[in-house]
Image (cartoon, rainbow, N blue to C red):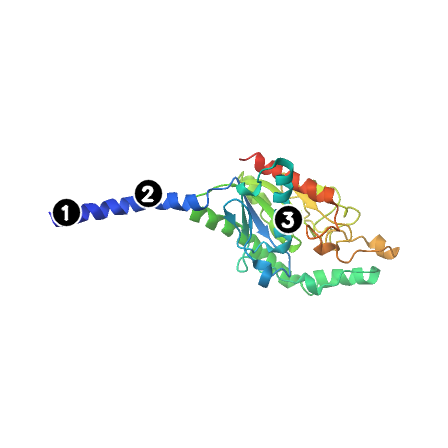
Amino acid sequence: MKKLLRGVVAAAVAVAATLVAPVAANAQEPCPAIAVVAARGSGENGGGNWAPQNYGGPYWSNGREGPTLAAMFHYFESRYNWDTGRSLMNSVKVLGLDEHKYPAAAPERNITPPTDFDSAVNLLREMVLPQAALFRDSFVNGTHGVLSTINEYEGATGCHPQYVLAGYSQGAVVMSGVERTLDRQGRLAGVINLGNPYNTEGVPGRIGTGLSGKGVLGWTPMRAGALSGVPRIEYCVADDPFCDLNVRKYINQQPVDGSAHGSYFRWNSSRAQDRDLAARIFASWVDARR
C-alpha cells in the first residue's frame, strides 16, 4: 500500500512539474509582440561591446547586437516614452547574432574613411578585394545564423512573434540574405538598416542626409530594397563611405565628415529629425502588433 501511495505521489509530482514549468518560464519572459534579430557591424566584437542590454520591460539581450544598434534601441525607447509616456521596448525582444553564427569579419576599424578621390578608390580596393573572402564567409555564416537563431528562440520559448531584421553596416548585408525567406513565411514585420553598403537610389524607406551618393556595394545586383516588399528603414548619414560614397565630393574637394559611419544614434552629428522619424516608424510596427 505504501509503495502504491509513493507511486501515486511521484506521478502527481511529475505531472505538476510539467504544468508548472512552462508557467514559470513564461512568467520570467512573456512572448513579445516583435522580436528583432540584430546583426552588429564589423569591428563591434568583444569586450564592453557585448554587454547584455535591457531596453524596457522583462527582456534582456545577449549584447551581441553591438553598441550601435544598442544605442538605437535605447533611443527608440526614450523617444516613445517622451511621446506617449509609455514603454515601447516592453513588447520587443532583441536577439543579437552571436559570434558563432555571425563572426562580423573584415573589421571596418582598419579601413580609413576617404578624404579625397584617391583614398575613395583605395577604400573600394580594401573593401572589395583583400577582404572579400572574409566578408563572404561572414555573410554566408550570418545568413544561416539568422534562421538558426530564430528557430532556437522559438524552440526554447514556444513563442512565435513577428520579426524585424536590423543590421548595421556589414550586418545590413547579412540580413538581406534572409528577407525573402521570412517574407514568404509571413513572419517579417520590417527591416532596419544603418549604413547599408547596398544603399542606392530608388530604395524605399530611405532617410537621413546621406542620399547624394551610393553604397560601396550599391552597384551590385543585390541592392537594399530589392528583396522584399515589407516596410523598411534605410538610414544613411551624409559622408558615411559605406552607404554614401559620393565620388563627386572628392573630385570637387568638398569637406567630408570622416566620423560619419560611427555616428548613428551615438552622438548628435546626425539630425534629430531623422533619428525621431526612424523611432516613430519602428514604433508603428510594434503598436500594430500588440
Residue 184 placed where, x, y %?
55, 40
> How many numbered tags mark residues here?
3
The amino acid sitting under disc 2 is Leu
The amino acid sitting under disc 1 is Leu
For the residue carrying disc 2, how many other residues have a C-alpha within 10 Å: few (<14), some (14-19), or many (20+)?
few
Q: Is residue 58 above or below residue 132?
A: above
Task: Assign a secondary structure to mark 3.
Answer: helix
Q: Pointer 3: what residue?
A: 72
Q: Pointer 2: what residue?
A: 19
For the residue carrying disc 1, how many other residues have a C-alpha within 10 Å: few (<14), some (14-19), or many (20+)?
few
Residue 161 placed where, x, y %?
50, 41
Task: Assign a secondary structure to mark 1.
Answer: helix
Furthest residue in direction top, as rendered: 288
Q: Are marks 2 and 1 in contact (CB under 8 Å)?
A: no
Q: Pointer 1: what residue?
A: 4
Furthest residue in direction left, as rendered: 1
The amino acid sitting under disc 3 is Met
Q: Is residue 60 above or below residue 42?
A: above
Residue at 19%, 45% (x, y): give it.
8
Whether residue 207 is visible: no
Is 74 left, or right, of 149 in this rendering?
right
Residue 68 placed where, x, y %?
64, 53
Q: Quadrant of residue 261?
A: bottom right
Q: CA distance from mark 3 to mark 2?
A: 39 Å
Q: Quadrant of residue 258?
A: bottom right
Q: Which residue is more in the foreground, 150 or 216?
A: 150
Residue at 21%, 46% (x, y): give it.
9
Q: CA distance from mark 2 to mark 1?
A: 23 Å
Residue at 73%, 44% (x, y): give it.
272
Q: CA distance from mark 1 to mark 3?
A: 60 Å
Is 112 left, or right, of 63 in this rendering?
right
